[in-house]
Amino acid sequence: MVADAPAPASSRQRGAMPSVRPRRQREEELLVWPDLVFVEFIAALIFTITFVALAILINAPLQDRANPANTPNPSKAPWYFLNLQELLIHMHPALAGVIVPTIFLVLLAAVPYFDTSNEEQGRWLATPRAWPNLIVGMTVGFVGTWLLIIYDSSKHIVLYERFSVGSEAFRVWPPFMAEENVRTWPETLNWLKSVRALQTDINWHNDLTGVPIGETFIRTDLLGLPRGSIQWNVPAWIVEQAIPIGIMVGLPILLSLVAWRTGLARTRRDHMILLISGWFASWLVLTVAGTYFRGAGLELLWPWDVYPAES
């Protein structure tokens, strides 16, 4: 019986030696100092100077002491929550205050797991179609959000009544100054005044405004709790939940499909840049609208009504 021949020494040494990772050149590295800390220092300096300039230029006088018996009108949340307060006007409170922010944060955290490409990783807007997708996403998000806010606040009716005038009214410039020729919004289209009008201006059947689901579907007594009479308001559910969810989910999908068919977005990163730009523009519009364009009773103001001229 012949024993196996031992492996050559060169083979044993070559198999035992660990592979050495090639050292990268300095141009291929990003160090904490000065690459990161220096940029952060410049950003913090610019941020501080900007805040000092705003504090000097913008008057922010102290008001009277807080009085719980005298609530200001409008009563607004802190500025970093005004976008959520704006959402509360247009949909169900639980949807706007809890579900939408939570899902948005989860989707942002999931972006690195969806966009797994290493192409131009770590660089801002380095892909060939990054800037077009950024511009299109920001434009669609900005314009689309403003149009939805204007529609849900019934301000399109004001535009219709001011600019839909008779032919004789064009002798006066601007045309909407001819008040005697202004047309009123057709009563047959009252259900198009806003999303809320779909609930209030349509004669829904009484059975749809109070569908008893507590006695059949949601049996709280089976859990040892008192049996509740839960009723489902179908019109309110359509207006406050179904339509907002359909818009928030459907419009980004439609935008992504159009960008894909037109060749604007071809890779996953293109789609992420497109959608995140649109989301950021919507967040910005909601913040600006809630901060500057909401007056007494949270009524949407026109730009010329935000700071009316003093008489």
Image: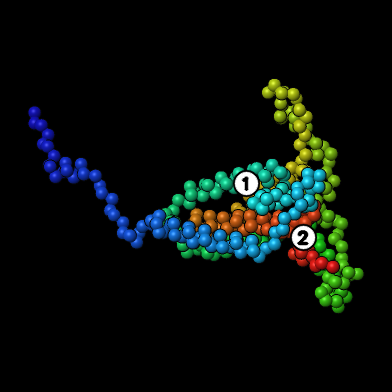
- In this view of the protein, can residue 263 be seen by the observer? no
Q: Amino acid at mark 1?
A: Pro
Q: Quadrant of residue 256?
A: bottom right
**CA neighbours of label 2 inside 10 A, class few (<14), some (14 to 19), many (20+):** some
Name the image quarter holding the N terminus: top left
Instruction: Point out which mark residue 301 bears.
Output: 2
Q: Quadrant of residue 151?
A: bottom right
Task: Identify whether 216 is placed above or below 17.
Answer: above
Q: Earlier in the sequence, mark 2 or mark 1?
A: 1
> Given the current orientation, which residue lies at the most extreme top position?
224
> Given the current orientation, which residue lies at the most extreme bottom position?
171
Question: Of helix, strand and loop, which one carries label 1?
Answer: helix
Instruction: Point out which mark residue 4 bears.
Output: none
Disc 1 target residue: 101
Q: Residue at x 81, y 47 (%)?
A: 70
The residues bearing labels 2 and 1 have C-alpha atoms spaced at a distance of 26 Å
**Horizontal relation, residue 238 to residue 16: left or right:** right
Q: Position of residue 45 (x, y in %)?
A: 52, 61
**CA neighbours of label 1 inside 10 A, class few (<14), some (14 to 19), many (20+):** few
